[in-house]
Image (cartoon, coloured by chain):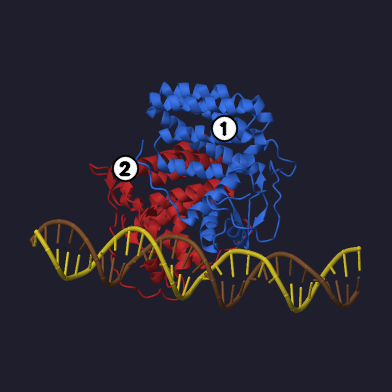
Chain colours: A blue, B red, C brown, D yellow
Amino acid sequence: MAPKAPVDTSLRSQVYDSLRDALTAGRFAPGQKLSFRFIAGTLGVSMTPVREAVRRLVAEGAFEMRPNRSVRVPLMTRDKILELRDIRLALEGLATEKAAALTTREHATNLRRIATELMAVRARGDTVADRQKIREFHFTLYAIANQPTLLRVIGGLWLQTGPYLNLLYPDFIASSRGPERRLRIVKALQAHDGATAQREMQGDIGDALTYVAGLADAEGNIAPAQPVESKRRRRPSPSPAGALAFA
Amino acid sequence: MAPKAPVDTSLRSQVYDSLRDALTAGRFAPGQKLSFRFIAGTLGVSMTPVREAVRRLVAEGAFEMRPNRSVRVPLMTRDKILELRDIRLALEGLATEKAAALTTREHATNLRRIATELMAVRARGDTVADRQKIREFHFTLYAIANQPTLLRVIGGLWLQTGPYLNLLYPDFIASSRGPERRLRIVKALQAHDGATAQREMQGDIGDALTYVAGLADAEGNIAPAQPVESKRRRRPSPSPAGALAFA
DNA sequence: AATCGAAATTTGTGATCACAAATCGGCGCG
DNA sequence: CGCGCCGATTTGTGATCACAAATTTCGATT
């Protein structure tokens, strides 16, 4: 295990994490407008750390800032999903291939454990845990490749597709060959068969995002899974002590 | 031509551009420590826009921030260069392939013009213009693919390799097959032959970065091309009116 | 002369404020 | 009932300040 990296405890970092989590969980409706002061009020901090956190998310494409002055969650279109799909195929395929060369027995065992846990939560119908486990499986796998920059870039891409992965439930997930595919991926990794692992991984990602792209309407727009309301204007009360979070 | 996007005139954006340009041109020595107040003083602005610009560059990997408190230009290692090489091969190959399907006669003519201008400045031995033209060629080409997210991610990667491309001069450049290769790429694009264009482009990028990786010393560290000094501590005078810039 | 520790300085962080531009509200005119 | 205009409000931007943590400086001690 690596010598535990020191955690960033700054408010900026906590605000960033809160926004990222809310985005990933689909708690913001695409197109929803947010203001610095609203976020600051919700999280009980001043505008300064909020500005830096939001600015970073804008740079990563998770928020968009119109030239005038408004921060909003980007609307997803079929073209954008397909673009993200192809980028993810290239990079996550690369990470998988590189991971194959470095996979140890411990790595494989760990991945199998996660895949098994995923099947368990799926059997319970717990979609929140389901998505969490999927993410854990992918990033644990990519971490094997030991390529920090690649991991960072992939993380940025997940931030953009994140809000729309709820659309996979329940139809796509029910019919997906995900569980068997994941086991095949682990098997290929352990055999150091990078080409097979890469192909299977790309199939997994490609199927899911192609499905999401197919949900677009005639204009190519994709509706969010959970059109979280929260259009309220009033200054909300600060979060309770502990982790900063959105409702 | 697209309807000219409105330019961001904020100080934050200008500071970001200044730092990016300085980084790209190799005006900062790797390992060099910078402080918010130093940058703010040099550019004649307050700390606020500097913080946001630097934070963004940190998120992009162009600067690194130690957990304690110091901003520095990352040191380059062979492993990091090879990682960046492989990511760039994947993404710029993808962009080239996608561009091939959309290349018009005008696109090809424009690219040929840039390639010709590059040969002209190279004949003059103008390395600054040389690097600028190379960048222009690549990004003009990738822009044809019309994939904004892909373009943004690639831009982030160039920011990290940028400071080290000076190492290509003069040896690698003199022996490189770049000029002919660029013409072959344009030819393939115009023929909508994505596979060939991609292969040639990957050869170009791969050769250059593999060469840079080969310059690493025994510990795997790569020395900067121009170890720009500037270790001075004194508060410098603000930039003259006009564009913000570093010496 | 080398080393350790405390004082002085530097530096990032977060909060607050003034300001201008954009947005929103409602009123009046058609 | 629709449309445009003007005032009130909202909102991002940039500057400034206090503060704590980290770094550096420098003198005392061995």
| Residue on which the image places disc 1 | A205
- What separation in Å lies between label 1 and label 2 (alpha carbons)? 31 Å
Residue B103, percent from left and from top: 58, 44
Q: Amino acid at mark 1?
A: Ile
* Residue nearest the viewer, comparing B92 with A104: A104
Q: Is residue B104 visible?
A: no
Residue visible at 45% across and 27% down in the picture:
A110
Name the quarter where the N terminus of chain B is drawn: bottom right
Does B139 appear above or below A4?
A: below
Does B118 appear above or below A67?
A: above
Badge 2: chain ID: B
In the displayed structure image, the side of residue C23 where residue A145 appears, left or right: left
Residue visible at 55% across and 56% down in the picture:
A54
Residue B126 quadrant = bottom left
Q: Mark 2: give few (<14), some (14-19) or many (20+) Cα within 10 Å.
A: many
Label of residue A228 in the image: none
| Residue on which the image places disc 2 | B78
User: Which element is circle 1 on?
Assistant: helix
Q: Is residue B153 visible?
A: yes
Q: Amino acid at mark 2?
A: Arg
